[in-house]
Image (cartoon, helix red, strand yellow):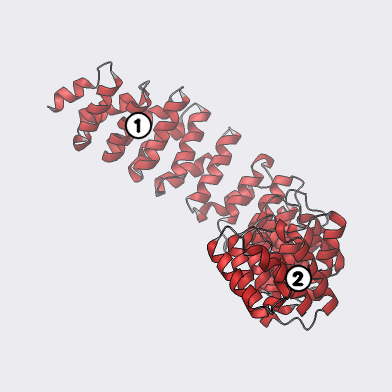
């Protein structure tokens, strides 16, 4: 039966080839099956190629790896990549099978072999063989070898790699990245000096390497480099500075110039750096910084949480700034949500530090723009109405009673009942005709509690 199945592998119909290959999965390590499967890595049909690859991986023997490795020399990029993927999935048996290809006369094959070995379990022979290509005539092979030695945790070659930094300009980013993998072995000074390299990519690699360090001495160094580092590396350096300010005891005076760099980083496209900028600006709080933070709310939930974490310590300043921002920009949703969140997150809803006039203006602002908010924000706003003076709280509840959302109206009705239905006669009369039966009944019950002849004026 097995012989018949193997013969079927030479049939023209792709579906029959796939069926035959799947039927041979239980015989994956038979030499004839392996040879036939390896040949089919070049089949025109994708399904056939993937089934053949699966057989080779199921076996994962040195023979299967040797038969597969032949195809990393293919001129067909699809076949070449499939062979590489198959070898990586085989694991350890593929490492030895790839070693001969490191000596190929074709520089592209040498590089591909190095790249694949870097993804496989390392062996002493593989590490030694790859290290031999640190002086390869092709720059791409040299860079791949440096990267591979880092991936293979070949600490014994670190010093040799570092000596190449001043010799091979093209390999500097690779050298820095590999050195960063050996945190304890690579000297801090190496990365500091690399941060001054004229190549922005090298600076970026050095900045990323330094970002994992939590040495308090580094803070002064990074602050000094901030004015000369490239725009590419600057966000990473700023992020490191903020983390060091938060995580280490420091006696370094924070320069005022840091403020402007952090304000600029609020416009970065990466939320990680935006959050770092927000956290760093905690050291420079004034009305301009508060206004910048307010204007950058709404970018993402994580950024908003970072902004709120800073602003909640300054509600007496932040709320007026948010109101002023709305007046100048015409935006209402972001400032309103921010104000609601600030009030909600005050410890114990303690508003003693915020003037009554500011709170009254905030309540009016929220009530006037109530319909622009989503249901969650409306419900939250009604939940904090207790911090406002009575007249402002009533205005906010009225806005809730007039809202089209049933959940919002329902909560507003409950609050109206506790506040006193006599303040909401007009709204309750309207709600007696609401399409929602529960709301109609609740509104009717509240109207009946009011004094006869009472008519609230809007």
Residue 305 position within the rendered picture, expressed as x and y whole percent measured from the top left: 66, 65
Quarter containing the C terminus = bottom right
Element type at marker 2?
Answer: helix
Label 2, on which residue?
A: 395
Does residue 204 sit above or below 79 in this rendering? below
Alpha carbon distance from label 2 to label 1? 68 Å
Residue 187 position within the rendered picture, expressed as x and y whole percent measured from the top left: 64, 61
Residue 330 position within the rendered picture, expressed as x and y whole percent measured from the top left: 83, 54
The residue depicted at 84 percent of the width and 66 percent of the height is 321
Element type at marker 1?
Answer: helix
The numbered mark, 2 or 1, whose residue comes first in the sequence reads: 1
Q: Is residue 20 left or right of residue 378?
A: left
Residue furthest to the left: 1
Does residue 117 sit above or below 442 in this rendering? above
Instruction: Using the rendered view, name the quadrant where residue 220 is placed.
Output: bottom right
Label 1, on which residue?
A: 50
Mark identifier at residue 458: none
Residue furthest to the top: 12
């Amino acid at each position: 039966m097995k012989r018949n199945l193997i013969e079927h592998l030479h049939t023209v119909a792709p579906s029959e080839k796939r069926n035959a290959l799947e039927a041979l999965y239980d015989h994956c390590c038979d030499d004839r099956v392996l040879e036939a499967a390896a040949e089919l890595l070049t089949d025109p049909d994708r399904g056939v190629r993937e089934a053949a690859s699966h057989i080779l991986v199921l076996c994962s023997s040195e023979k299967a790896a040797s038969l597969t490795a032949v195809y990393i020399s293919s001129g067909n990029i699809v076949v070449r990549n499939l062979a590489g993927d198959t070898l990586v999935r085989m694991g350890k048996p593929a490492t030895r099978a790839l070693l001969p290809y490191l000596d190929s006369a074709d520089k592209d094959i040498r590089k591909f072999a190095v790249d694949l070995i870097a993804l496989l379990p390392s062996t002493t022979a593989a590490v030694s063989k790859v290290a031999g290509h640190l002086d390869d005539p092709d720059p791409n092979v040299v860079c791949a070898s440096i990267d591979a030695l880092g991936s293979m945790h070949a600490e014994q070659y670190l010093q040799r790699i570092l000596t190449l930094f001043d010799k091979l300009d093209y390999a500097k980013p690779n050298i820095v990245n590999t050195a960063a993998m050996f945190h304890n072995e690579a000297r801090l000074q190496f990365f500091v000096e690399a941060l001054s390299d004229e190549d922005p990519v090298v600076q970026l690699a050095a900045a990323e390497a330094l970002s994992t360090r939590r040495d308090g001495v580094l803070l002064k160094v990074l602050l000094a480099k901030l004015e000369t580092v490239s725009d590419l590396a600057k966000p990473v350096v700023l992020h490191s500075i903020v983390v060091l300010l938060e995580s280490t005891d420091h006696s370094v005076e924070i320069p005022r110039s840091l403020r402007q760099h952090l304000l600029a980083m609020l416009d970065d496209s990466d939320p990680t750096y935006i959050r770092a900028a927000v956290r760093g600006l905690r050291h420079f709080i004034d009305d301009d910084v508060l206004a910048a933070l307010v204007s950058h709310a709404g970018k993402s939930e994580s950024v908003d949480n970072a902004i709120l974490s800073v602003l909640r310590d300054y509600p007496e300043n932040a709320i007026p700034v948010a109101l002023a921002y709305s007046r100048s920009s015409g935006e209402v949703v972001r400032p309103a949500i921010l104000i609601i969140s600030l009030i909600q997150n005050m410890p114990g809803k303690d508003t003693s530090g915020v003037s009554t006039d500011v709170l009254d203006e905030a309540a009016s602002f929220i009530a006037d723009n109530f319909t622009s908010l989503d249901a969650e924000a409306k419900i939250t706003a009604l939940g904090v109405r207790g911090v406002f003076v009575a007249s402002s709280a009533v205005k906010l509840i009225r806005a809730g009673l007039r809202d089209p959302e049933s959940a919002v109206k329902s909560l507003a009705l409950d609050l109206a009942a506790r506040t006193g239905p006599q303040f909401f006669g007009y709204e309750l009369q309207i709600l007696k005709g609401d399409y929602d039966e529960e709301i109609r009944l609740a509104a009717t019950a509240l109207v009946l509690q009011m004094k006869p002849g009472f008519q609230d004026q809007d």
